[in-house]
Each structure stands twice: as structure tokens, then as C-alpha cells.
């Protein structure tokens, strides 16, 4: 078999193969014999039909199987002859020809993994912001818990003041249209609401809105006009003047319980106030440690990716970019963006998605190479342990869950992800991480 592999730009290569007639005939004979053993042809006992009859009866299927085997043999031979050939994908063969002399030729384009020299990946220097749990953080959480146990009393002997809670009904328009008509489904809660609780304070709802409620009493109706901010999540409503028709239904004052052991017992039975503060601090520190780990991982991977540059397979990059764009659209819609917002920002979105895709693919290839260099492996017992955890999370029997993963070809992805996680852990454990003071608002 004559194999030629010619490298091309963008992580591509062209493989041309010429298979001699004797090799083609040997493969064809094996395939015909296999078909003969399985065929049931009238007038012949199983396995006794002549070769010519089998070939005539199953001609197209035999040719299809023959070409498939010859393609596979050629790929295996190419890898054997070119040890550094790392094939990610094989496109459809072209110029497939069965010659009169019995030989067989074809060309096929291969998508290859990028080639690069690993940068020095041990001892990476990275900086992350220092994250500390302070007494102020603990007190903020305690105050939130305190508010859960607040009592609310009707206000009947005076008008609304700062700090009170108002229960209101409202509808809103802009330029004669409801906000929902302008901003779509995401703006529906702003178009109308009934029984809406709002605290009369500067930061509530929209700037200046609750100031207009000061001095009102239950039963009062008022028109309040606000200008929506320029960074409003729903783009179609940005800087629009919105007119709210408001009816005050009730006014309430908030009576917060004392910060004492009695309140602590309601928050956590049989605990004192100091016990509850300790529980809050432990929870905040656990969250801070998780956040610190995530920041560290991202910083180390970003640092690694910044140390080298190499070509990425164009088709892989397109696919990853589309996946990232789809994810960003989903994030945007959950944040309140309309279809119109997304269409308007399509170019910006795809540019950001491509940046994400480049970083993701670069990191993936680098981590794979590090795992290979450091001879990292994932044992079958480790995969089984991971699958067992996944099955329990999905409330599925482990054996059934495992069979489903095998059927869908997902086990290899799980093993690969575990291998990459090991490479990340290795990088982080060998990195020089410096915690620095986060920038102040002024800086």
C-alpha cells in the first residue's frame, strides 16, 4: 500500500492512498466468504453458494464494506508511518477509484491536532484577589436572617415614610405603549403588577420612584414618571421615559427581632447567637474557598494559554464558537435580553464567542499534552466511581446508567474530562499563587 500524507495550513493534511490489486482481492475474498456464510439464497445450502452468485446478489454491500476496510487500513498505515500524526477527524474520501487492473485509489482530507512546543508549565506565577471573610460579612448575613423573622404591622395613623413597606398595584406605559409591547416578554412584570411589596428607600425599584410614595396613604393613586437607565438589561427600554399609574393598597412597618439567643434558637434550634455567628462564618469561608479555587484555576489556565500561540483546526474552532455563542445567547435571554437585543448585538456576541472558543480549545490541547508528558492516566475504577456519583445525582440505578453512557458513547468523554481535571490539579499544585489586595473602587 502506497500512502502519502501532505501537511496543509489550518491543521489539515491530505492523505492519498494507492492499494495494489492483490491487497484489494484478498480483502474482497474475505468479505465475500463472510457474506456467503450468512446468506440464504434459494437453491443453495447455507454457505455453499458460488462466489459469483454471492457477488451478484450482494454486490453494492460488498463494495461498501470493501471500501470501508480499505479506508480504515490506509488510516492505520498512515499513523504507523507517521508517528506524530494525530488525527482528530477524517472528511469524506474523494476521487475514489476502482481501476481496471484491480487496484484502488482515493484521497481524503484529515483534520489534525495542532502541533506546538509546550511552554514551561511548572511554577506558573499568578496573582489572585485576596478573599477574606470579615465580621462585617458575618453581620450582613445575620441581618438578612433577622429580616426573615421580622413582623409587619399595618400603618393606619400616618402617611408613608422612608423605610416603610408599601404594597402597590401598578401599570406602566411609554409613548402610549405598555412596556411589554416595547420590551417583549421580559418586560411583562414591569407592565403591570398587583400586590407588589416595595421598601421605600433610595435603591428600590428605579431611582426616585419610592420618593414619590413618601406622604401617601392606603387608597391613594399617583402617577410616577421615571427615566430608565442607559444600562437597563432590556435594550429596547433603555433611556425610555416610563409612566407608572400607582395605587397604594397598604402600608406596613417592619419590626425586627432583637439579635439575641432567642432569635438564634429560631434560626438554628438549640444554638446561641455566638453559635449562629460561627455557623455563618464557616459557611462564608467555605464559599470563599470555593470561589478562590475557581479563580485560581482560571488564572493558571489563562496564564498557561498566554505563554504560547498555535494554529487551531478551523472546523473545530467554528463548531466551538457556535457552541459558545449559543451558550451566551441563553445567558443573555435569562438576563432579560430580547430577540431584538440579541440580533442587534450579534456581531459583538460572535466576536466574544470566538474569543472564548480560542481560549477553550487552546487550553484543552495544552492540558492534553501536559497529561501525556506527565504520563497521567485515569483508571477504570476511577471512571466507575465518577459514574456512580453521577447516577446517584440523577437518581438512576448505576448499571442502567452505565449502559446508557456506553450506548451513547459518553464514557470516553467522561474519562477525557477526568484526565484534563488531573492536569489542571497538577498545574495548580505546582503554581506560585500570590494573593493580592483587590482593587478599590477609586482605582
Image (spheres, rainbow, N blue to C red):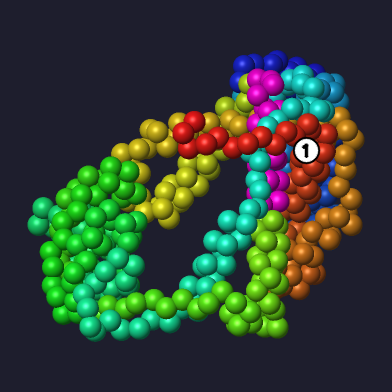
Please state the total of marks drawn on the protein image: 1
Above/below status of 206 relative to 428: below
Q: Going by the image, does 155 lie left or right of 177?
A: right
Which sits in the foreground, 333 or 99?
333
Q: Residue at x 66, y 67 (%)?
A: 277
Query: Is residue 294 within the magenta segment?
Result: yes
Q: Main secondary structure of the magenta part?
A: helix
Above/below status of 171 relative to 350: below
Name the residue at the left extreme.
Answer: 176
Above/below status of 280 relative to 316: below
Residue 124: percent from left, percent from top: 76, 28
Q: Residue at x 76, y 44 (%)?
A: 421
Q: Which residues are magenta?
A: 288-310
Q: Mark 1 packing: few (<14 Cα in 10 Å), some, or many (20+)?
A: many
Q: Going by the image, does 112 lie left or right of 320?
A: right
Q: For numbered disc 1, what is the local secondary structure?
A: helix
Would residue 161 be seen by someone viewing this image from the given angle?
Answer: yes
Would residue 12 be seen by someone viewing this image from the given angle?
Answer: no
Q: Residue at x 42, y 78 (%)?
A: 255
Which sits in the foreground, 382 or 129?
129
Q: Going by the image, does 178 lie left or right of 281?
A: left
Residue 385: percent from left, percent from top: 84, 61
Which corner quadrant of the image does residue 347 belong to? top left
Which corner quadrant of the image does residue 98 belong to? top right
Above/below status of 407 relative to 164: above
Q: Going by the image, does 319 lie left or right of 83?
A: left
Identify the image quadrant of the N terminus.
Answer: top right
Residue 123: percent from left, percent from top: 81, 28
| Residue highlighted by disc 1 | 428
Query: Is residue 107 within the magenta segment?
Result: no
Q: Residue at x 69, y 56 (%)?
A: 285
Residue 53: percent from left, percent from top: 75, 48
Amino acid at each position: 500500500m502506497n500512502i502519502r500524507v501532505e501537511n496543509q495550513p489550518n491543521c489539515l493534511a491530505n492523505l492519498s492512498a494507492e492499494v495494489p490489486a492483490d491487497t484489494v482481492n484478498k480483502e474482497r475474498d474475505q468479505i465475500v466468504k463472510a457474506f456467503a456464510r450468512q446468506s440464504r439464497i434459494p437453491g443453495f445450502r447455507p454457505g455453499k453458494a458460488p462466489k459469483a452468485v454471492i457477488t451478484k446478489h450482494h454486490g453494492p454491500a460488498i463494495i461498501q464494506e470493501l471500501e470501508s476496510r480499505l479506508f480504515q487500513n490506509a488510516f492505520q498505515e498512515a499513523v504507523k508511518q507517521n508517528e506524530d500524526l494525530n488525527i482528530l477527524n477524517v472528511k469524506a474520501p474523494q476521487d475514489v477509484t476502482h481501476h481496471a487492473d484491480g487496484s484502488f485509489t482515493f484521497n481524503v482530507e484529515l483534520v489534525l491536532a495542532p502541533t506546538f512546543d509546550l511552554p514551561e508549565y511548572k511554577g506558573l506565577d499568578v496573582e489572585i484577589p485576596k478573599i477574606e471573610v470579615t465580621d462585617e460579612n458575618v453581620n450582613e448575613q445575620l441581618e438578612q436572617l433577622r429580616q426573615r423573622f421580622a413582623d409587619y404591622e399595618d400603618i393606619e395613623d400616618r402617611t408613608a415614610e422612608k423605610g416603610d413597606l408599601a404594597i402597590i398595584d401598578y401599570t406602566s406605559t411609554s409613548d402610549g405603549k405598555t412596556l411589554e409591547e416595547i420590551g417583549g416578554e421580559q418586560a411583562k412584570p414591569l407592565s403591570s403588577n398587583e400586590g407588589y411589596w416595595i421598601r421605600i428607600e433610595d435603591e428600590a425599584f428605579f431611582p426616585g420612584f419610592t420618593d414619590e410614595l413618601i406622604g401617601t396613604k392606603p387608597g391613594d393613586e399617583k402617577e410616577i414618571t421615571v427615566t430608565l437607565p442607559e444600562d437597563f438589561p432590556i435594550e429596547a427600554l433603555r433611556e425610555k421615559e416610563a409612566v407608572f399609574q400607582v395605587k397604594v393598597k397598604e402600608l406596613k412597618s417592619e419590626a425586627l427581632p432583637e439579635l439575641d439567643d432567642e432569635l438564634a434558637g429560631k434560626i438554628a434550634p438549640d444554638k446561641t447567637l455566638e453559635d449562629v455567628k460561627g455557623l455563618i462564618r464557616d459557611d462564608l469561608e467555605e464559599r470563599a474557598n470555593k470561589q478562590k479555587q475557581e479563580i485560581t484555576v482560571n488564572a493558571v489556565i489563562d496564564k498557561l494559554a498566554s505563554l504560547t500561540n498555535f494554529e487551531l483546526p478551523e472546523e473545530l474552532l467554528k463548531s466551538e464558537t457556535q457552541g459558545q455563542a449559543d451558550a451566551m445567547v441563553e445567558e443573555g435571554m435569562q438576563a432579560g435580553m430580547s430577540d431584538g437585543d440579541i440580533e442587534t448585538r450579534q456581531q459583538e456576541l460572535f466576536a466574544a464567542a470566538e474569543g472564548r472558543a480560542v481560549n477553550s480549545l487552546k487550553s484543552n490541547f495544552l492540558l492534553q499534552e501536559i497529561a501525556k508528558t506527565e504520563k497521567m492516566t485515569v483508571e477504570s475504577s476511577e471512571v466507575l466511581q465518577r459514574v456512580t456519583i453521577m447516577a446517584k445525582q440523577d437518581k438512576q440505578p448505576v448499571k442502567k446508567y452505565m449502559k446508557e453512557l456506553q450506548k451513547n458513547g459518553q464514557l470516553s468523554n467522561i474519562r477525557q474530562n477526568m484526565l484534563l481535571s488531573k492536569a489542571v490539579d497538577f498545574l495548580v499544585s505546582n503554581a506560585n499563587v500570590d494573593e493580592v489586595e483587590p482593587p478599590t473602587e477609586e482605582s
